[in-house]
Image (cartoon, rainbow, N blue to C red):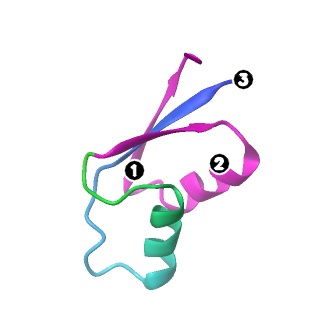
């Protein structure tokens, strides 16, 4: 299964609460923090909502 490395690149200051919750659900708290998720539709939807704030890279399963 493909894995996605998601990194927070923009601050959450001044962003709507709904957007903050989506970023928190991805497991991101600080700028430049990265997490790895499976490539599933639910994660893809969260990535789509926050695409202007995060960076996504494909990584091989380790």
Q: Residue at x 72, y 42 (%)?
A: 40
Element under label 1?
strand
Q: Position of residue 45 (x, y in %)?
A: 66, 56
For the record, the magenta segment spans 33-62
Question: Eyeballing the image, is 21 above or below 30?
Answer: below
Q: Which quadrant does the N terminus fall into?
A: top right
Question: Eyeballing the image, is 34 above or below 9?
Answer: above
Element under label 2?
helix
- Between the C-alphas of marks 3 and 2, the distance is 14 Å
Element under label 3?
loop
Q: Position of residue 43 (x, y in %)?
A: 64, 50
Magenta stretch encompasses residue 61: yes
Q: Which circle, 3 or 2, is nearer the viewer?
A: 3
Which is more toward the observer, 41 or 26?
26
Q: Residue at x 66, y 25 (%)?
A: 2
Q: Position of residue 55 (x, y in %)?
A: 39, 42
Q: 39 left or right of 54? A: right
Q: Residue at x 45, y 83 (%)?
A: 17
- Between the C-alphas of marks 1 and 2, the distance is 12 Å
Whichever of labels 1 and 3 marks the residue nearer the N terminus, that label is 3
Whichever of labels 1 and 2 marks the residue nearer the N terminus, that label is 2
Tag 1 near tag 2, CB within 8 Å: no
Tag 1 near tag 3, CB within 8 Å: no
Question: Eyeballing the image, is 60 above or below 9?
Answer: above
Quadrant of the rendered image containing residue 38: top right
Mark 2 lies on residue: 44
For label 3, count other residues whose C-alpha is less than 10 Å away and answer few (under 14), some (14-19) or many (20+): few
Mark 3 lies on residue: 1
Mark 1 lies on residue: 54
Tag 3 near tag 2, CB within 8 Å: no
Q: 42 left or right of 32? A: right
């Amino acid at each position: 299964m493909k894995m996605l490395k998601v990194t927070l690149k923009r601050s959450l200051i001044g962003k709507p609460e709904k957007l903050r919750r989506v970023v928190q659900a991805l497991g991101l708290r600080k700028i430049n923090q990265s997490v790895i998720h499976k490539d599933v539709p639910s994660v893809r939807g969260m990535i789509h909502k926050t695409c202007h704030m995060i960076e996504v890279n494909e990584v091989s399963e380790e």
